[in-house]
Image (spheres, grey):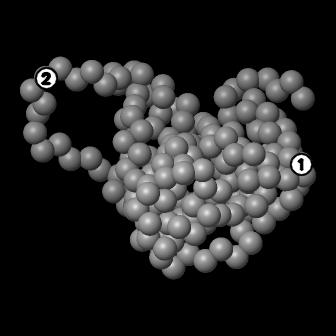
Amino acid sequence: MGWSESELVERAVRGEPAATEALLTDVRPGVVRYCRARLGQLGGAYTTADDISQEVCVAILRALPRYRQQGVPFSAFVYGIAARKVADAQRSAVRRLTVSVDSVPERPDSTPGPEQQAISADQARRLALLLNQLNDTQREIIVLRVAVGLSADEVGTALSMSATAVRVAQSRALAKLRTLAGDVFGEVSAA
């Protein structure tokens, strides 16, 4: 096929099945990493994050016919949808804090035990606490650069910043996280 990203997007917008499949194949791994980084593990598994990443892909498919290239890369469009879906999932999780069990499993449970779940949940809570101390832009930069693996140019385009501004903001955010980590994890900071 050998299409450029803009040609691939253009063909997918026109409804070409091969282009649509190739486009989703290209964006899905980054969407999964983004959702996992933003939502973390729940009960020792990434089920919710993976479900949300699937919802993001479905939303992309639904929005494709209306998508218009306006000098912004397609990744900005993708991560905009992903950010909204993650925010919806976070709001929904806060609303339903109770878990109901309809039946008793017939096989032994191979998921992490209560102690490991507590340790993982505590670490996730502490990391979330750290990330929440950053402003929205810094948090998005850290997630997109570190968890998703986008380049500074890609993140800059997605957030309407220059690649240099992304690198500077990332450096400042990481420095802030290092300082805060000592407080959150009960360690002495090296600063």
The foreground one among 72 and 102 is: 72
Q: Percent from the top left, x then y, of residue 176?
A: 82, 41
Q: Quadrant of residue 3?
A: bottom right
Where's the C terminus, which quadrant? top right
**Residue 29 visible from this viewpoint:** yes
Q: Residue furthest front?
A: 1
Q: Residue at x 67, y 41 (%)?
A: 149
Mark 1, other Cα within 10 Å: few <14 / some 14–19 / many ≥20: few
Q: Secondary structure at mark 2?
A: loop
75 sits to left or right of 85: right
Residue 83, above or below 45: below
The residue labelled by disc 2 is 107
Q: The residue under label 2 is which amino acid type?
A: Arg
Residue 53, above or below 174: below
Q: Percent from the top left, x then y, of residue 180?
A: 76, 37
Mark 2, other Cα within 10 Å: few <14 / some 14–19 / many ≥20: few
Q: Secondary structure at mark 1?
A: helix
The foreground one among 135 and 71 is: 71
174 sits to left or right of 117: right
Q: Residue at x 49, y 59 (%)?
A: 19
The residue labelled by disc 1 is 168
Q: The residue under label 1 is which amino acid type?
A: Val
Residue 174, above or below 112: below
**Residue 35 visible from this viewpoint:** no
Q: Percent from the top left, x then y, of residue 31?
A: 53, 50
Q: Percent from the top left, x then y, of residue 87?
A: 51, 61
Distance between mark 1 and mark 2 Cα atoms: 51 Å
91 sits to left or right of 190: left
Q: Residue at x 86, y 47 (%)?
A: 167
Q: Residue at x 69, y 26 (%)?
A: 186
Residue 43 tag number: none
The foreground one among 62 and 183 is: 62
